[in-house]
Image (cartoon, coloured by chain):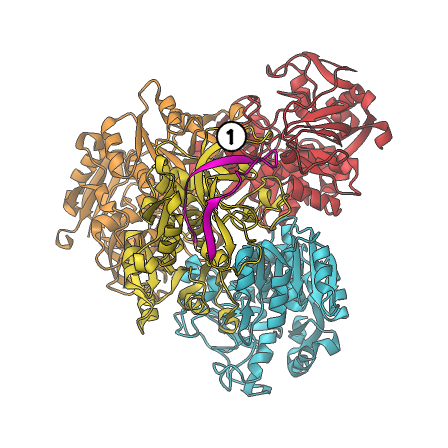
Chain colours: A cyan, B yellow, C red, D orange
Amino acid sequence: MKALVYEGPDKKSWKEVPNPTIQHSTDVIVKMVATTICGTDLHNLKGDVPEVAVGRILGHEGIGTITEIGSGVTQLAVGDQVILSCVSSCGRCSNCRQGPFSHCLDPEGLAGIGWIFGYMIDGTQAEFVRVPFAETSVYVLPKGTTHAQAILLSDILPTGFEIGVQYGDVQPGDIVAVIGPGPVGLSAVMTSRLYGPSKVIAIDLDPARLKRATDFGATDIVNSGDADWMKQVLDLTDGAGVDVAIETIGMPQTFTMATQIVRPGGSLANIDVYGKPIELALNELWITNIDISMGLVNTNTLAMLLKLVAGNLLPVDKFVTHEFSFDQVIAAYDVFANAAEHDALKVLIQLVDAR
Amino acid sequence: MKALVYEGPDKKSWKEVPNPTIQHSTDVIVKMVATTICGTDLHNLKGDVPEVAVGRILGHEGIGTITEIGSGVTQLAVGDQVILSCVSSCGRCSNCRQGPFSHCLDPEGLAGIGWIFGYMIDGTQAEFVRVPFAETSVYVLPKGTTHAQAILLSDILPTGFEIGVQYGDVQPGDIVAVIGPGPVGLSAVMTSRLYGPSKVIAIDLDPARLKRATDFGATDIVNSGDADWMKQVLDLTDGAGVDVAIETIGMPQTFTMATQIVRPGGSLANIDVYGKPIELALNELWITNIDISMGLVNTNTLAMLLKLVAGNLLPVDKFVTHEFSFDQVIAAYDVFANAAEHDALKVLIQLVDAR
Amino acid sequence: MKALVYEGPDKKSWKEVPNPTIQHSTDVIVKMVATTICGTDLHNLKGDVPEVAVGRILGHEGIGTITEIGSGVTQLAVGDQVILSCVSSCGRCSNCRQGPFSHCLDPEGLAGIGWIFGYMIDGTQAEFVRVPFAETSVYVLPKGTTHAQAILLSDILPTGFEIGVQYGDVQPGDIVAVIGPGPVGLSAVMTSRLYGPSKVIAIDLDPARLKRATDFGATDIVNSGDADWMKQVLDLTDGAGVDVAIETIGMPQTFTMATQIVRPGGSLANIDVYGKPIELALNELWITNIDISMGLVNTNTLAMLLKLVAGNLLPVDKFVTHEFSFDQVIAAYDVFANAAEHDALKVLIQLVDAR
Amino acid sequence: MKALVYEGPDKKSWKEVPNPTIQHSTDVIVKMVATTICGTDLHNLKGDVPEVAVGRILGHEGIGTITEIGSGVTQLAVGDQVILSCVSSCGRCSNCRQGPFSHCLDPEGLAGIGWIFGYMIDGTQAEFVRVPFAETSVYVLPKGTTHAQAILLSDILPTGFEIGVQYGDVQPGDIVAVIGPGPVGLSAVMTSRLYGPSKVIAIDLDPARLKRATDFGATDIVNSGDADWMKQVLDLTDGAGVDVAIETIGMPQTFTMATQIVRPGGSLANIDVYGKPIELALNELWITNIDISMGLVNTNTLAMLLKLVAGNLLPVDKFVTHEFSFDQVIAAYDVFANAAEHDALKVLIQLVDAR
């Protein structure tokens, strides 16, 4: 089969590799019909993550058709169209049964977390993928759901919802601020509306991104390059501060911005991957009764979000700005790596005959 | 009347001052029968807090008898024995009605938080105290409750319970670690048992404090001076990490310790007052799905805890290690300020004829 | 002033009565600008409720302008435009501080519940009203909010939301069924959308009511007169049953219908006033893990809902189907009492010069 | 092997039957070391339950040693000592992943609920048992846990805790009433203490049962045969009513008793199996804001409770009042069926050489 292989720092190729095979009784093999690229893939490609060995197939998002099932698999069948969760979970260990679901104790003896595709094991940017613990890690695609809808459910939509909206504890009537309306930030903007907020404020330096945020459900926008950006945000809250600040950039400055706009008793949810420690002003914040959360998506809401997407209640297809075939995957990386230049959000990479 | 007055940095005196009078229709005047000293009082005395003006009466904990009521007070009467909450709340503003209760929007136009005794207005280390918003800020003492029991409810017991145990979301079966078993830490140790933990681990450098922690409900102790302290803690959790880490010291090192022992998906509750910012290793922690909380006590559980204390279900009287009369208040400060030397926890300062 | 007075079973008159006066320091007097009629008013008029004495002014919903304040009132002022909650709460008793807010322990020595307007004390269908515990029982009207919007917040919208949607624990992705899309049922339909359901099914015998339900947010309708109504509902849930059934009719048959369509582990929320006991098939239901709730509105979400209404996020003005002036109140009752005939939902009764 | 076989209404025998064998890749075979008898077994024996076919092996509680594993089982091994949950769950269906866990959608095509042992498939009163979905239906026994402790965890202790205490939402400081302190009622009494109640009131007609309840954690007892029993209960709550009433008898009268003592806003948790419908006085209760729950145990807290039992924090061994060997199982039924006469709670039936 063909797959996108990591060849060392900043090197990748779409090339012929052996097909995957069933290794455990709980595995299935999936013929991929669509995949996409995530910011983490770019990070892995740089060579910064030692666990990503040369030869590793990249990618952790995708949809496809089951072509083979392990002997212990009874609730999935060859021919099922499925969405692959970016997080693999065995469904049996204490973390899978009690949570946090993303921290599967992992009897494959790998990372100690559930995210292993394109990281500890071969990933989804390939014609075929071996999916471990399939019965608790894939979701059957409802009829009528498009690839552009379904591909969002592998990672980006549950991430915005679980780690931003739910960890941030958005409640009806709340004022929510989302710092950084990129793909994950826009997922938080869109899914925050599932809890009936009174305002969703998008905050960013880029006017084009802010404008797009209003298409995804932001009620108000604030340019953080403005000298009085903080006053603009607080004015939208009658001076009280936002109920929930969702931070998606992962920089010390944006973290601090979030602490400055959240009201006493409010929540600060970090969806981002941070590259270095930040300074937390506990000397000022200890008295504010705020709550700070963070984490890797559990995808325990994937099935629920899929129900809303299938019912056309979440217009996720607007995330896909560019489409490619599998053999154009290198071009797709170029577009995604230069997203601002191409006004790109998510790229959909799919089988030509599956479109 | 006599009261303990702040006379400038490191200076205080027990001296004659005018009696307080009703200023608002929601005020009551209370003749104090007992008070105590808190770490914050020592802090204020140093002169570090500009809001504490020379001439301010210190203290924010106490019990007493109502001697006068404002015209708008209908549910309290002269003669009622009451506990004063350390937090004043008007009961009408949005924060008092929806929470956080400690952040009363404060129509007296003062601090913008509910803690004002001994800080923004005259405090409780006095023979008489004016109590604002009395109907929503005092609690009638049940018969049979002793001064040594009741005095704990003004601040220390609700603080350990609300900011440590409840913000930390202790659940039945959890393993809880409390870093720093001083008065507030021991409140968290004792009240954590209200949620049925499987273990409560006290962590400290001082063997005497650790030994005492076992009297207050700790099931295990770990000396953080030991080179392998972290391994000792993790071994008590079968390597998984504690479900809830409660930090009460307020130092960067102890905050970091807490982040090192909490399990993925667990909680880190800060009860302490921090003097400077800390470094938060979000580069390592972002993937751990932990939750970090902090805050000023709301005292919304004071009535509930009082019910348990009155039923002798929480042995809080063991917090009082030393007793003084009001005119010995300076001596009481000496003992409390040198707590380790005197093996002191809380000092009870009371009317001679009330004992 | 003029007021609508209960004159005995099925008798009422709009007549001259003495103006109300301040009786307690926490009272205010409000000059009414709008009121409406509720099903409970019709019930009281029949003479079935012995607590409703001859001479009682009817009504418990309304908006108006404060004309006088008691000596203990500091956070409201003469001239404030306010919404009156149908539930009076002192804000100080244990139920007001810990919940249930609708069960104020009532220092006026009245009903033992918070709903007293038009029942235990004179109500709101009058030119002036005395409002007890005003600071915790009225809400200042934001600028730009219309009477037709605001009048819904006294009772009907919080009732549908709190007792239907919140007690029923609607969650994102849920399938919700509302039996009886009258005014309260439509409130539940509309506000259920604040929790992102995947479907909201309206169930009724009347095609006109069902058709209207789709304007208020129902995604599906089922006529319970159809022989296969239950199959129609279950088919909408893939056979699993609805997550939340909200019953608003108050008849044994409709209660039983609700138990027949709720899934294992689901919720049945009763918003209705029942006139007689019902049979509960615990022999079949004990194993279903369902939850049954009921109750009087607390109005603790009134301020939050008002924020959404003021932001035009809840189109509540469509509830008002007929408008009257105060001196047409008898005609308004005729229309409301024969709602089906007039295709009426809520009638708005207002000052001529306030329109 | 030997097993206790249902031979028709009121007939059973301990006789030789074929050993069970692995049928699905997720099965294990367990050699039983201990089992016990539940009230449901007596019910099934009477012949009232048509699903219980002649020839069915009875029983749904037990502990044993794994002797064989299916090909899909990777996290359990031959030789593991395990507790069998009374509820079988596949761990993969939507109910197993989202709850209610007791309503496994059951790919064996059986009952549509998770309780199948001794009902839809052969049970645990046998020398060997086939356990379906073993990895999500058994729990490895910690070293040092006795049979008398562990046997309680199959059903009775999780039932009292989940369906009584958790569904009843017991909170610190609450006053809890348990009607019927039999085995399940005493489980609720004992485990309610995990949420720090201020009082636990046992209510029963039998003075001997009431006396025993105090050994299991009841703080107060009321004999419901007393004419003023209700006043006695209300007096213990200062007239307010209990926060949580847990009903374990399953009779219309005891259900009504529970509704009469619960406070406004409180909870009524039914743990019992009802044989006929009850009358629910919604005409009186609609305004009380109470919540009524019921259900089959999920055993999702089994692992947590096991941790507390293993730490000797729940003295469950006192439930076992009588011990028998496997070949005395008929005698054990005689004692359990006449529990009052023998002052029996739970009977422990075990391998002679396992004691």
Give the total of numbered labels.
Answer: 1
Quadrant assignment, res D295: top left
Quadrant assignment, res B52: bottom right
| Residue A232, above or below D292 | below
| Spot occupied by residue C204 in the image (x, y as percentages of width and height) | 66, 33
In this view of the protein, which residue sits in the foreground, C50 or C288?
A: C50
| Spot occupied by residue D306 in the image (x, y as percentages of width and height) | 30, 53
Q: Is residue B264 left or right of residue C45?
A: left
| Spot occupied by residue C233 in the image (x, y as percentages of width and height) | 60, 41
Extreme residue in the front direction: B16
- Would residue B35 be counted in the magenta stretch? yes
Range covered by the magenta-colored residues: B11-38
| Residue D311, above or below C226 | below
* Quadrant showing the N terminus of chain C: top right
Q: Does residue A185 appear anywhere in the picture? A: yes
- Would residue A76 be counted in the magenta stretch? no
Q: Is residue C37 left or right of residue A11?
A: right
Chain where mark 1 sits? B
* Quadrant showing the C terminus of chain C: top right
In this view of the protein, which residue sits in the foreground, C167 or A261?
A: A261
Extreme residue in the left direction: D353
User: Label 1: which residue?
Assistant: B76
| Residue C140, above or below A17 | above
Callout 1: SS: loop
- Name the residue at 37% across, 47% down: B328
Quadrant assignment, res B353: top left
In this view of the protein, which residue sits in the foreground, D8 or B230?
A: B230
Query: Label 1 neighbourhood size at 10 Å, few (<14), some (14-19), many (20+)?
Result: some
Q: Does residue D295 appear anywhere in the picture? A: no
Q: Amino acid at mark 1?
A: Leu
| Spot occupied by residue C201 in the image (x, y as percentages of width and height) | 64, 42
